[in-house]
Image (tube, grey):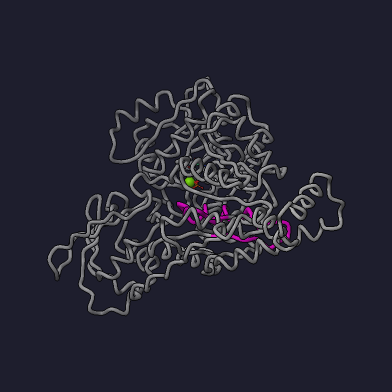
Amino acid sequence: MKNQSNQKLSFADLSLPAPLLRALEDTNYTEATTIQSAAIPLLLDGQDIIGYSSTGTGKTAAFGIPAVACVDGALKRPQVLVLSPTRELALQITKELQKFAKYKEGIAVATLYGGASMTDQIRQLKRANIVVGTPGRVMDHMRRRTLKLDEIKMAVLDEADEMLSMGFIEDIQLILSETPEERQTVLFSATMSAPILKIAREFLKNPQTVDVITGQDNQADIKQTYYYVSQHDKQAALTLLLRYSDAQRAMVFCNTKSMVDELSGALRKQGFSAAGLHGDMNQAVRTQVMNRFRTGGTGILIATDVAARGIDVDDVDTVINFDLPQSFEYYVHRIGRTGRAGKQGLSQTLVCNGKQVAVLRSLMRFTGKEIVKQSLPTSADLMNHAVEKTAAELTDMVHQPSGAAAKMLVDQLLCAEGGDSTAYEIACTLAEKLLGGDKAFQSVSTKEEPVRRSTPGQDHKSPMVTVIASIGRNAHITPNHLVGTLAELLDIPGRSIGKIDIREDKSSIGMREDFAMALMHHNTPVRIKGTEVTFTVQKSTRRAPSPVHRRFSGNAKTGKRNQSA
Ligand code: ADP
Ligand code: MG
């Protein structure tokens, strides 16, 4: 059965036990994500589910909240088992579960993964009622009888497709078959495939399918544009776009709280009705800001991604990405706020260097939609726009009776003693006051886009370099994983990647310098088997050692999305 709904609920609507609701109030989550809204009620109701959804959509809480809810804190035996492909993911899940369990008595989580002390894990298992682990280490503990699965009520396969592609299928089958028949089973995967369906048939009972793949279910009609400007012109460009637009409601996104404050202050100073929203503001203030935006009291809302998650305003005319988002999913979320209810939406993105233009290109590939380059409105455009708008307003008013003060002013100007002002001159003076003088229409120039780097593949004379990837044997990868990932990322044939040497916790890859440069310019996190990977250019084999030792940017090191809000 398929349950495809894109409705989002607030956590309060989900009939959660009080300690969980209270724990959620302590997080910055204001509203359940789509997958959470769909999955949590089904799981609380005891059903099995298969969830398809891409990364960053909040799957951990989708199973984590019902998991914590179903555990009996007084019973110190494993009641929930979560299998995860990697140690990093297992640790992340544990952290998230602990957040939800904050106010529920007696919840203890054990995290089991290879390469760490058994003794310590055995100690954790003595009191754990939730177990999160990689299949290999879970099997180890089962063999040693330090992990018993006969009280398991819920089993979760997180990133099941990853676990299968890592060859864990037999382990998973064995583990699940040791758990009670009447358990509830949850399977999450980013992709749908025959082996996934096979596992589902084997271990899930009448599962509900919850399908929310971001980036594909966005059918809204949104015109996506971008403007290339210098870094120091960004704020001026934002002002221009807002001034030039006829939007009743605009959302401006940036990546840090301090930028939210800076922009909202700057815009208010220029007379815009603008308000900022970020995670440092308390809930009461945030609610007030959102309500004012929803009811039209504020025209422009400046927000960070995380803070904006909770807002559900249908009628945003334009979304402006002042900063490029940290992930593609965020971009899709951001622009999804416009173009609702059958209206055409508009997204406008500011970029200020070649690297960001490259990110836009990858974004276009990701979403399959074009993002069109535009020039900022010129002074003449701005002037025409203001004149037309003001003229329309005044024409509407011309036949309305004027008040005594207005008449007095005009009479006085026309009949000023010794004055010889004509009606035309007086009208111009009043208009100047209204429009603000020509200085108000200064524009900012749109930058010329840099000449595109020669497309990898054209430059056959490019020297070879060695790139180090921060992933190795202990993540169970093969050269094929690296080749596949890089070929797809750089849009080159796999055979153009050179020698690969996989070591314990890193790998070296020979590749042409132009490919390596393209890789360094890639701006979004790269995951291989669920682990975020950083790339470093090590050395040039033909030239003198290159000074380039750039880290692949983004938040790759922590393997976490930026949580600056
Ligand atoms: P997935 O497993 O789908 O990749 P995660 O569960 O790791 O996604 O969540 C991605 C990010 O979103 C995490 O940083 C998480 O804390 C955050 N997040 C999850 N649910 C919500 C929510 N309802 N509101 C705000 N942030 C959320
Ligand atoms: Mg996840």
Q: Find the residue positioned furthest to the front.
A: 418
How many marks overall?
0
**Residue 118 drawn above or below residue 434:** above
- Residue 218 coordinates in the image, percent (x, y): 62, 60
Answer whether residue 74 is visible to the viewer in this image.
yes
Residue at 12% x, 66% y is: 544
Say whether residue 264 is left or right of residue 94: right
Task: Report the front residue among 116 and 53.
Answer: 53
Task: Report the front residue among 254 and 564.
Answer: 254
Task: Report the front residue among 274 and 191.
Answer: 274
Say whether residue 527 is left or right of residue 305: left
Answer whether residue 2 is visible to the viewer in this image.
no
Residue at 80% x, 61% y is: 395
Taking the magenta stretch, the answer to whether it contains residue 329 is yes
Residue at 67% x, 35% y is: 14
Taking the magenta stretch, the answer to whether it contains residue 97 is no
- Residue 381 coordinates in the image, percent (x, y): 60, 67
Q: Which residues make up the magenta segment? A: 320-348
- Residue 138 coordinates in the image, percent (x, y): 39, 39
Say whether residue 24 is left or right of residue 552: right
**Residue 258 drawn above or below residue 483:** above
Say whether residue 476 is left or right of residue 446: left
- Residue 431 coordinates in the image, percent (x, y): 68, 57
